[in-house]
Amino acid sequence: GAGVSQSPSNKVTEKGKDVELRCDPISGHTALYWYRQSLGQGLEFLIYFQGNSAPDKSGLPSDRFSAERTGGSVSTLTIQRTQQEDSAVYLCASSPGRYNEQFFGPGTRLTVL
Amino acid sequence: AQTVTQSQPEMSVQEAETVTLSCTYDTSESDYYLFWYKQPPSRQMILVIRQEAYKQQNATENRFSVNFQKAAKSFSLKISDSQLGDAAMYFCAYRSGGLPTGGFKTIFGAGTRLFVKA
């Protein structure tokens, strides 16, 4: 079956512009996670959605970052007024439930010039 | 707050040999899960093995096994009969067992890059 997909695979933008990153989770997965991976670093948790519950936004680094998940499926991570330090790979993962394995997408590489 | 530490930025192993990757973590929770993920150059994160904290028996998946020492908060990964395809970044990860003591975010270590020599 289809795995987690993310688009675009690469995004180059200018400092100060807004960007939207999209994640399509595996069908039926109720949990969805966003992570940020800076060059040569581990994964930094950003936000977690579980069903209809309020999302856990505790990892969002600033109010320029926001995410939504429409209809319990597709999720969009928005970064407003991008800065050069936002350059990283943004990974999305989904899971059948909160206690299960996370399945990762291929990531979006964001470069802010 | 929970932390995960991987003290080996890089490791190297000869093909067909055994290698152990180290991971330590810090938590005050009693209910949690531990994972090892593999990230090849393709960037695709792949689950290698998982361990529930309440289980005393060490998890095993084919050539991959863990040494889980709960009291020492240590969770090392052993790769036996190493293959060229094992070359990748390996991340140790911690996830809380959930409410009320914590949420469900997963904390990752900085990673260990494994090189496999032919």
Image (cartoon, coloured by chain):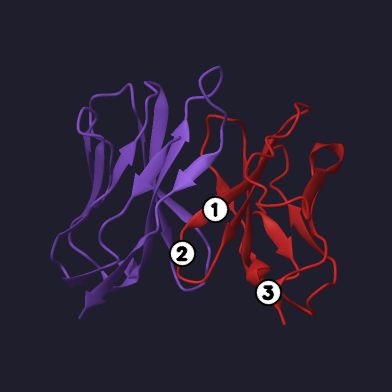
Q: Quadrant of the C terminus of chain B?
A: bottom left
Q: Is residue B73 above or below residue A13?
A: above
Say if labels 1 and 3 share a chain. Answer: yes
Residue A110: image quadrant is: bottom right
Q: Amino acid at mark 1?
A: Glu
Residue A77 falls in image quadrant? bottom right
Task: Please tell me which residue is depicted at 42% across the width and 36% down the height of the picture.
Answer: B2
Determine which quarter of the picture holds residue A8. bottom right
Gap in Å between the C-alphas at discs 1 and 2?
Answer: 9 Å
Q: Pointer 2: what residue?
A: A41
Q: Which residue is mark 1?
A: A44
Give the chain letter at badge 2.
Answer: A
Give x and y (percent) for residue B34: 38, 38
Look at mark 3 in the image and give the residue it sits on.
A84
**Amino acid type at image mark 3:** Gln
- How busy is the neighbourhood of tag 1: few (under 14 within 10 Å), some, or many (20 plus)? many
Q: Residues within 10 Å of mark 3 (few under 14, many from 20)?
A: some
